Amino acid sequence: MRRKNYVCAFLDLLGFRTYIGKDLRGAANLIMEYKNVLDLTLMAQNVRAPRTARGSDLSQSPALQNHNLQLKVTSFDYFLPFSDSIFIRSSNPDLFVAQISSFLSKCLTLINKGHEFDETSEHPFQTGVRDAITHKKGRTIAKQVPVFSWPVLFRGGISYGDCHPMKVTSILNGLKESATILAGNAVVEAVQFERRVKGSGPMLMCSKSFYNSLSKEGRKYVEKVRDHYEILWPAFRYYDDGPNSSGDFRHAQTFEELFRPAAIWWNACNHLEYASHYYNLLKLIIRSTLHYYSLDGRSVAAARRHIETRLKEHGLLSKAADLMKKKPEVSL
């Protein structure tokens, strides 16, 4: 009997350990933020659009139906959080590569909905202050401490192979409980891929076995980098309902949702230990955008012009050559 293979992804929440030292509540809120993204996605995918007697969607073109399918998490068989990490299993590689990209993109842009970033601020993550009460030697001391809203960014590894759920015994509040874990060579390989790119920002690396499991369409936004592959997950944020024959840049608003916060974060934090996360996020957004515009008759020249204009407006034009490289330098 042939053993069935599955996709296994391991995601690590970037900066979590560093943020805990600055604001425990803010760091813990990162987990609640991605939980909210998942909850909202699950709620939305259970809402059915009006359909004809033959079952087709009344309101959407086939291209839009496919795009909306990519925004769901229907390919996730298992989604198992553990501390600041997540394991995900899927039996549909093509749909998974689109849906995991959409999930990461929604986590990135969620923070934009909460507050407007001050481009001149040295502390763009600080959203306010709160009262902190401590007791010392019989005295009550009240002081104000900053409140932060950190970006929800993940670095991940993906593999394809043995990945099977197992029921194990755990203890919760002193009571015996059943818990689910994933086990198999794909689990081990996914963790190894994530650990190979430490310090490289929110990259989503995958094995050759996963790449080989994808169709030609599924490989559209996957690039080979040395001896492995990288998913250009921000590219899935873009959508065209038909070919672009005008030769212009039609996604200025979508690009801004991705680019602007990343540029602000880098400018404010480029002297800090975790600055490389934001610089490599900028690189990834730009590479993904240029890759998207290099396909299907779109104008990559128009995309480059728009990106260069935005880099100049954020004082980053001197870094344009590096930020707009086709492929990154990855230390393995």
Image: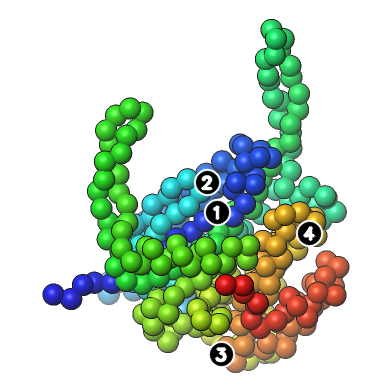
Mark 2 and mark 1: Cα distance apart in space? 8 Å
First along the sequence among labels 3 and 1: 1
The quadrant of the picture occupied by the N terminus is: bottom left
* Residue 267, image quadrant: bottom right
Q: How is the image coloured?
A: rainbow
Nearer the viewer's eye, disc 3 or disc 1?
1
Q: Are marks 3 and 4 in contact (CB under 8 Å)?
A: no
Residue receiving disc 2: 31
Residue at the (73%, 51%) spot, across then down? 116
Numbered tag placed on residue 296 in the rendering: 3
Residue at the (50%, 64%) spot, across then down? 194
Nearer the viewer's eye, disc 2 or disc 4?
4
Secondary structure beneath disc 2? helix
Residue type at tag 2: Ile
Q: Residue furthest top?
A: 138
Residue receiving disc 4: 270
Nearer the viewer's eye, disc 2 or disc 1?
1
Residue receiving disc 1: 13
Q: Are marks 2 and 1 in contact (CB under 8 Å)?
A: yes
Residue type at tag 1: Leu
Residue type at tag 3: Asp
Asked whether, in this view, residue 227 is left or right of residue 142, the answer is left
Residue 6 coordinates in the image, percent (x, y): 31, 69
Mark 4 and mark 1: Cα distance apart in space? 20 Å
